[in-house]
């Protein structure tokens, strides 16, 4: 099905396909996506001279592990957080060279408040954040380079609410 779309400020009209609604197709995509758990981030294993033996050891222990070569590293993907933590403990124990990306649910929340007067008190904002249930780990008043501009406030909040 096509619909005629008039572009604002233009004399030309274009023909564009009309997207089908999920109800018309009978698919329930949004319900399936909301129930899915987010996958943990990959473990980045450094490619060394002994990578074949390292991968054999890892694949023997973790059968459902997925891997992909990217540059100097092999990304090791797991299906759930439990398997992810087991893999981390294992590669630490056998002393393989690797690094991990901190999962989003473990990263601190970063906030910036803009348009504040230059003479506001950081302690008052910290107290207000604690009052609504957030624990500021680090708070800073970011002053503008120009003296007449409004300042900004930056804070890191822990995810434990």
Image (cartoon, rainbow, N blue to C red):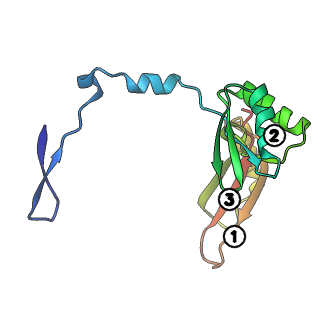
Ranked by sequence position, the earlier of labels 3 and 1 is 1
Image position of 149 with respect to 161: above or below = below
Residue at the bottom extreme of this rendering: 146
Q: Which residue is mark 1?
A: 143
Q: Which residue is mark 2?
A: 53
Q: Are marks 3 and 2 in contact (CB under 8 Å)?
A: no
Question: In terms of depth relative to the viewer, which is nearer, 152 or 29?
Answer: 29
Question: In terms of depth relative to the viewer, which is nearer, 14 or 72?
Answer: 72
Residue shown at 72% from the left, 37% from the top: 159
Image position of 86 with respect to 16: above or below = above
Ranked by sequence position, the earlier of labels 3 and 2 is 2
Residue 123: mark in rendering: none
Residue shown at 19% from the left, 40% from the top: 18
Q: Quadrant of residue 59?
A: top right
Q: Position of residue 142 (x, y in %)?
A: 70, 66
Q: Are marks 1 and 2 in contact (CB under 8 Å)?
A: no
Q: Nearer the viewer, mark 1 or mark 2?
A: 2
Q: Which residue is mark 3?
A: 153
């Amino acid at each position: 099905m096509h619909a005629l779309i008039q572009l604002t400020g233009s004399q030309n009209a274009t023909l564009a396909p009309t997207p089908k609604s999920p109800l018309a197709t009978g698919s329930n995509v949004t319900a399936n996506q909301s129930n899915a758990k987010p996958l943990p981030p990959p473990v980045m294993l450094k490619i060394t001279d002994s990578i074949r033996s390292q991968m054999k050891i890892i694949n023997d222990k973790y059968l459902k592990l997925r891997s992909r070569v990217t540059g100097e590293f092999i990304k090791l993907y797991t299906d759930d957080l439990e398997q992810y933590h087991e893999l981390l403990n294992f590669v630490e124990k056998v002393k393989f060279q690797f690094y991990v990306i901190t999962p989003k649910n473990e990263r601190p929340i970063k906030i910036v408040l803009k348009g504040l007067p230059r003479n506001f008190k950081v302690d008052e904002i910290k107290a207000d954040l604690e009052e609504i249930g957030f624990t500021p780990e680090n708070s800073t008043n970011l002053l503008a380079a120009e003296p007449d501009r409004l300042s900004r406030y930056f804070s890191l909040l822990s995810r434990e609410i």
